Amino acid sequence: RKMKEQLLDQMDLERERGITIKLQPVRMDYNGYVLNLIDTPGHVDFTYEVSRSLAAVEGSILLVDATQGIQAQTLANYHLAKDQNLTIIPVINKIDLPSARIEELKSELVNLLKCENNEILMVSGKTGLGVAELLETIIKKIPSPAGKFEKPLQALIFDSVYDDYKGVVAYARIMNGNIKAGDKIHLISTSVASEILEVGYFKPQLIKSHELKDGEIGYIVTGLKDLSACKVGDTIIDQKNISQKLSLCLPGYKEIKPMVFAGIFCKEGVEYYELREGLQKIKLTDASLFFEPENSPVLGPGFRCGFLGLLHLEIIQERLKREHELDLIVTTPSVAYQVKSKNGENIIIHSPQELPNQNEIIEILEPWVRVDIITPKEFLGGLMSLMTEKRGIYLTTDYFSNDSDRIILHYEMPLSSILTNFYDKLKSASSGYGSLNYEIIGYRACEVERLDILVAEELVDSLSLMVYKDEAYRVARKIVESLKNVLARAMFEIKIQAVLGYQIQNKNKGGKVIASERIAPLRKDVTGYLYGGDVTRKMKLLEKQKKGKKKMKALGRGRVDIPTEAYLAVLKR
């Protein structure tokens, strides 16, 4: 009754898209052996989930789709497993499909892994073909856990979630010792003490058990109510061994930092509290999400959110829409810039509004990434042109094998270049065959500045953005033209200006207008009833109308309300 396709993918979104978003542990009994498995995501945005899981196991199954072949993220995850010195079992899945490229894939895997042809297993998850052989190979090749039951408790937390009824639930690998309900524990990095309420296994549902012992993976109901007290990568020890905590502490994980930022607002301002509640609930199961309140004169109250990448942003947006029925506006994604100021401070800014005045800045740095692209050889020219257009720096080209028509391109480029329709252009340039993986390699100096948009001489801060100096005019031209097309005419002239170097603190000083448009005012025909006679009568009436419009503007009635549609038109530039 409970059986369904993609059993380990718990979210509807995972099953619909056919991707894994959240790691999922499961315990399996096979021929008298206990296998602790962790199903991990493959996408580059969720590499952190993979690295956490690898630290909790002795071996890994490198699963390759027989129809798609080795992807860029397959390569990245292989290197993660190799760095952890894990036993790697190469497996080709979906061999039952007519479009499976088995022999070509075998050749590529032999070249990549430096393994023998007969070491690569053939499996069909759909028909069950080869699954028994895979399980036997796991038992034969992957070493048993090396922990000891009699040693002091050491448990590595590789994930944690919040349950409305149970509180904080830690997903842990028991390295040494054992743990059971009623035990008093201590979490080393947060220095928090608690009493265990329940322990158990993943089947994949939570199944309560008497204890968890060395070598096992399971869940621990910690008795805590604050998820931040149970950090991923922390070590759980017995309260009575607190004096030995330095020697018992396990190597943890590097704390993940969001690199892509965007504003999330509700189309209906009254839904702000529902949005806040939705983000808080998602945060309980996704610790990598960052958010803080942000107020926009155009879009109203909302949140500035940090994500691991564009897919992560898309998933969060979709979950808010589905689980909380919110109609959202998401601003253009941007990266976190590092600013060196003349007063010696190094500050990280997440939005253009946080950028200090130009005369206070020594240097601005942006995050760079190393990019690996796997593609058929025939698309090499188009992809290299795309990378040049996106400010990429060429490193090397690798070949899978002599008889393979696929290559790996290695580049370095700014992270911001990936955020603007890069993935769509990559798929277009490679006819859908190209795949991408990237990793952050640090910050480098860049020539960027803030581009501000003024409508009727009023700054619209939600339309401000960071642009490269050599692209500023092109971007500014597109924005002012988009606004001209969507803003409604008013009783007075509306000037739309794109300005560089605008000083927010003193709007009468500084700033260079690099693109502008005007929307002509609506005018009543005040001379329509006149005919013949002296022309000065006409001129008098037109002058009176002009003064009236000037007075209306001076009294503050010349303010322009920017509709959401206008804002969205700019985002689609």
Image (spheres, rainbow, N blue to C red):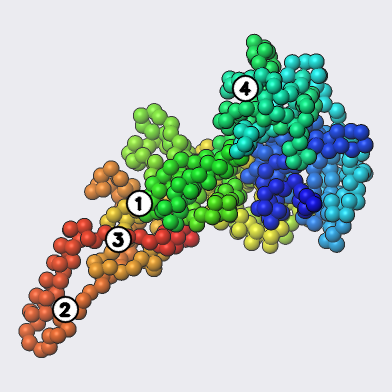
Distance between the alpha carbons at the discs numbered 2 and 3: 24 Å
Secondary structure of the residue carrying tag 3 is loop
Looking at the image, is mark 4 or mark 2 nearer the viewer?
4
Q: Which mark is residue 526?
A: 2
Q: Position of residue 143 (x, y in %)?
A: 86, 29
Q: Position of residue 462 (x, y in %)?
A: 39, 51
Question: Is the Cβ of the residue at disc 4 closer than 8 Å to that at disc 2?
Answer: no
Name the amino acid type tagged 1: Pro
Instruction: Quickly name the residue at label 3.
Output: 560
Instruction: Quickly name the residue at label 1.
Output: 297
Distance between the alpha carbons at the discs numbered 2 and 1: 36 Å
Q: Position of residue 476 (x, y in %)?
A: 40, 58
Question: Is the Cβ of the residue at disc 1 closer than 8 Å to that at disc 4?
Answer: no
Residue at the spot 80% in from the left edge and 57% down from the top edge = 67
Q: Which mark is residue 169?
A: none
Distance between the alpha carbons at the discs numbered 1 and 3: 12 Å
Earlier in the chain: of badge 1 and badge 4, it is 4
Check disc 2: other Cα within 10 Å, few if <14, some if 14-19, many if 20+: few
Earlier in the chain: of badge 4 and badge 2, it is 4
Q: Is residue 306 visible?
A: no
Relative vertical location of residue 231 with respect to residue 299 in this rendering, above or below = above
Residue at the spot 39% in from the left edge and 46% down from the top edge = 295
Distance between the alpha carbons at the discs numbered 4 and 2: 81 Å
Earlier in the chain: of badge 2 and badge 3, it is 2
Residue at the spot 83% in from the left edge and 38% down from the top edge = 28
Name the amino acid type tagged 2: Val
Secondary structure of the residue carrying tag 1 is loop
Name the amino acid type tagged 4: Ser
Q: Is residue 437 visible?
A: yes
Earlier in the chain: of badge 4 and badge 3, it is 4
Instruction: Quickly name the residue at label 4.
Output: 194
